[in-house]
Amino acid sequence: MEMTLFISALLSSIFCYLGAIESPWLFGMSGGFYVVGRPLVAGLLVGIAFGDIQAGVACGLAVQAVFIANLSTGGATNSEITYAAYGGIGLALATTKDPAVAVTLSVLLGQTFGLIFYNTRMALYSFWNNRAQLAAENNDTRGIMLNHLIYPQITTFLIRAVPIFLAIYFGANLVEWLLKSVPEVITHIISVLGGVLPALGIAMLMNIVIKSKIQLIFFFAGFVLLAFAQLSMIAIVFISALVAYLYYVASARPSTTSAQETTTNNTVASNGVFEDEDLF
């Protein structure tokens, strides 16, 4: 059991490093941060590491819904998504395999320890950048390579992989003990909050995407098709694409017609021909 948990925690920590925004091994940010670093993909990978893909994807889906509207403005971020994904999902699969617990742990790790290590990484990177700049001024090719490529990647691995490994391997027993020791009402509250947080994430995304209240009708129409008509997600995607195209065409046509009328009026005015309505 201990060896199995060791291997699972080790694989999860390596995946967390590969999903870092600074990791270059999976085609940079394209395959790393924007694919492996996403909670849904993290759930699949951690599920493979723990030998339970179904539970991993379920936890990843719940965590992805929470962070679906997570935005980073400039260098500021409110939560470190890779720590949240791999730490929370890994701990959940090592204990209860409950998506609600995975959500609660992900938010806790992402907004506390994740931000601490994220800011630590930025401070250390500034140190390596200064050394790389000094090496460039002295035409030190080896110093540039070490300070720009090697040392930052070692720093990233130590800051990301090691904490996630320790959290999963040594924190699994602690989390399991806490869940068993606290009163049942507390665990029920955790489950309820864990179920509410994904809805909050989707609501935040809707607040960003929906520009007018009338557009809420599309959301409710999709909900009806899914909940009552019991259509599959693939069918709803195709219907949504068709409706989006029709909406785009209908929205663009008035402005096009108005532009054509303006062009026609300008042409008539330039030719010196005026109608009675042009005088007023």
Image (spheres, grey):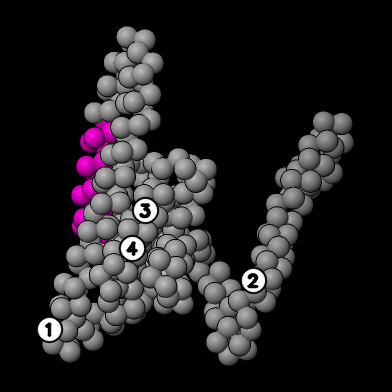
The amino acid at mark 4 is Ile
Q: Return the disc, 4 or 3, that comes first in the chain's sequence.
A: 4
Within the magenta stretch, is there residue 113? yes
| Image point (19%, 81%), residue name | 179
Residue at mark 1 to residue at mark 2: CA–CA distance: 45 Å
Q: Residue furthest top?
A: 138
Question: Where in the figure is residue 195, as x and y percent of width and height?
Answer: 34, 79
Q: Of 137 and 245, which appears nearest the observer?
A: 137
Q: Residues within 10 Å of mark 2 (few under 14, many from 20)?
A: few
The amino acid at mark 1 is Ser
**Foreground label between 1 and 2:** 1
Q: Which residue is mark 1?
A: 181
Q: Which residue is mark 3?
A: 14
Q: Is residue 255 above or below residue 197?
A: above
**Foreground label between 4 and 3:** 4
Quadrant placement of the N terminus: bottom left
**Circles 2, 3 touching at the beta carbon (< 8 Å):** no
**Foreground label between 1 and 4:** 4
Residue at mark 2 to residue at mark 3: CA–CA distance: 34 Å
**Circles 1, 2 touching at the beta carbon (< 8 Å):** no
The amino acid at mark 2 is Val
The amino acid at mark 3 is Ile
Label 3's element?
helix
Question: Where in the figure is residue 159, as x and y percent of width and height?
Answer: 26, 46
Within the magenta stretch, is there residue 124? yes
| Image point (71%, 63%), residue name | 245
Q: Which residue is mark 4?
A: 7
Q: Which residue is mark 2?
A: 237
263 on left or right of 189: right
Magenta-drawn segment: 108-126
